[in-house]
Amino acid sequence: MKYFSLIVLFTFLSCGNKEDILLPKANTTIVKNVDDLSPIYIFFRTKEKDTLAEVNRKNEIISTNWIFNIDKRLPLRLVIPEVMKLQQKKREEKAHKNELAQNYYSYADTIGKNLAFIPFTNVFYKLEKPKSGIVVFFLKNNEVQVNNVIVKKEKFQDYLNTLPSDKSNKYVFCFAKELSFGSYLQYEILIQSLKFSMSELNVGNEEFVY
């Protein structure tokens, strides 16, 4: 509840204007509580026909856990470059570096009725196509393409179960750059469940957006 209050306070006091962020929604909580945090906001903006991502990081403290509050309407092509810049800044910090500090995306758990978080500290984003591996490409409309085979999101794990269980097969997760951040976060929660239920899944720490 403290963190909900912090968001509300920022909403009404930023620059004297009302500021709104529509957080992504999901029906599960990955992480429920995060202490010692700094909030970072990425707002949805429009200018004429263009969509813009506006970053507000006034409260960032390098040694704390960073909570990324990102409007779910923003496309990945705008969000991920900004996230990469912030990740790089934190990774390169020497003087105030805290090895225990993590990065989290925030979202709303519609079942638990609470604010929830998903860690992404160790994810390295690439704005290009992968050069090898079993390519798992997350698309719009809840569709996933696995090496050119299209499957529905709800059938994704079943499809993976049909593939040869060779640990040398490395799965590479890729995302359409026009995918909304809200859809991306739901896919990330799906990936978390896959890693938990399929411990033999060979997955690296890189994600590709193109």
Image (cartoon, rainbow, N blue to C red):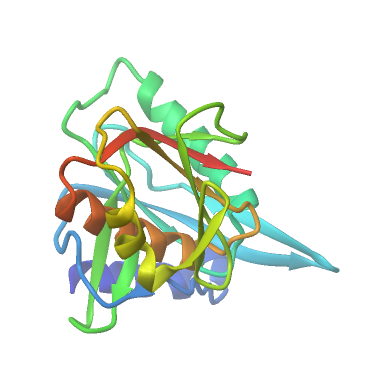
Q: Nearer the viewer, residue 118 or 17?
A: 118
The x and y percentages for residue 100 are 16, 32
Q: Nearer the viewer, residue 44 or 208?
A: 208
| Residue farthest top in this picture | 94
Residue at 16% over, 52% down: 196
Residue at 20% over, 68% down: 29
Rendered view: 200 above or below 146? above
Left or right of residue 137: residue 97: left
- Occupied quadrant, residue 94: top left
Figure quadrant of the N terminus? bottom left
The x and y percentages for residue 165 are 25, 41
- Occupied quadrant, residue 90: top left
Left or right of residue 189: residue 48: right
Report if residue 105 is visible in the image.
Answer: no
Rendered view: 135 above or below 181? above
The x and y percentages for residue 195 are 22, 49
The x and y percentages for residue 66 are 31, 45
Figure quadrant of the C terminus? top right
Residue at 46% over, 75% down: 12
- Occupied quadrant, residue 98: top left
Rendered view: 105 above or below 65? below
